[in-house]
Image (cartoon, rainbow, N blue to C red):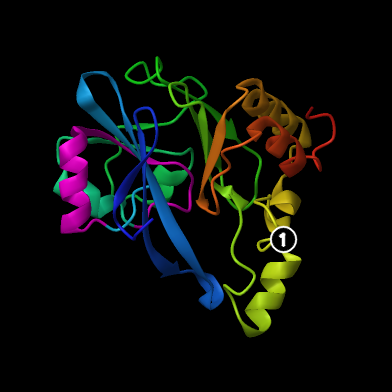
Amino acid sequence: MRHEMISQFGPELWLADGPSIKAAAGFHYPTRMAVIRLRGRDLFIWSPIPLTNALRRGIDALGTVKYLIAPNTLHHMFLQDWIAAFPDAAPFAAPGLPSKRTDISFAGELTETPDPAWADDIDHVILTGNAITTEVVFYHRPSGTVLFTDLLQQLPKDWFSGWRAMVARLDLMTEAEPTVPRKFRIAFRDKTALRQSVRKVKSWNPRAVVMAHGTPITQDASAFLDRAFSWVPGSK
């Protein structure tokens, strides 16, 4: 998939990959967003990437941007640009983000209950109790796709070099298939809540799993989730 070009992934679901961005300590990550078309051609934008003219033309061809979603407390860097470009769209935040981004007037903070505006098509679960981030994992029913942001990752083995490559390997970021990085595993304080959340994700019996940083899973998605969360006791 070329950068910034929208590609259909499933029924009423499109993906767009953006440029790499720098994070703490000089680490860089690829970016990916998802576009879900709801009834009436309203668009639900998950984890917005940098907005370019080409990307906007592709978005406009699909429908009307209605909802802008920051799915965890780390993925919000480009949200303000999208709000400026689509002033009629409603921005929604993962729990805890509004206090971090006081410059943004959010339409709402995501709760355990999906918003009625998209509840017919999209379910979600909030993975709480993580010291690094609170992430909302979404499930798009028409395409059978689960959307993870940072809690599942997979980067090529040669993505980093030097000491960063060693850190990435130890953190499980460059495994043969996407998995939960070690730092996030350690950061979960409430294992009971985590177990319940993972059980809900698995109960969706998805056909595909998409993440912001990694190769989408399009076959045996349920078996993949079993492997990815095998370290969570009692989550099966």
Q: Is residue 133 left or right of residue 181?
A: left
Secondary structure category for the residue under label 1? loop
Q: Above or below — where is 88 with respect to 167?
A: above
Task: Assess whether residue 227 is covered by the magenta stretch.
Answer: no
Q: At which x and y percent is residue 93? A: 40, 39
Whether 137 is drawn above or below 203: the answer is below
User: In terms of depth relative to the viewer, which is nearer, 56 or 234?
Assistant: 56
One can see residue 82 in this view = yes
Location of residue 38 (image quadrant) = top left
Task: Where is residue 108? Give x, y as percent.
Answer: 35, 31
**Residue sitting nearer the eye, 150 or 228:** 228
Is 225 on the left-hand or right-hand side of 148?
A: right
Residues drawn in magenta: 51-77
- Res. 103 in view: no
Quarter of the image with the C terminus in it:
top right
- According to the image, label 1 marks what residue? 172
Quarter of the rendering containing residue 88: top left
Q: Disc 1 residue type? A: Leu
For this orientation, the residue located farthest to the bottom is: 162
Which residue occupies 69% across, 36% down? Answer: 225
* Horizontal and vertical percent position of residue 69: 36, 39
Please say whether residue 60 is one of the residues in the magenta stretch: yes
Query: Going by the image, does 28 lie left or right of 62?
Result: right
Residue at 77%, 36% (x, y): give it: 191
**Labels in figure, total:** 1
Query: Alpha-carbon neighbours of circle 1 within 10 Å: few (<14), some, or many (≥20)?
Result: many
Indicate the quadrant where residue 183 lies. bottom right
Judged left or right of residue 84, residue 184 is: right
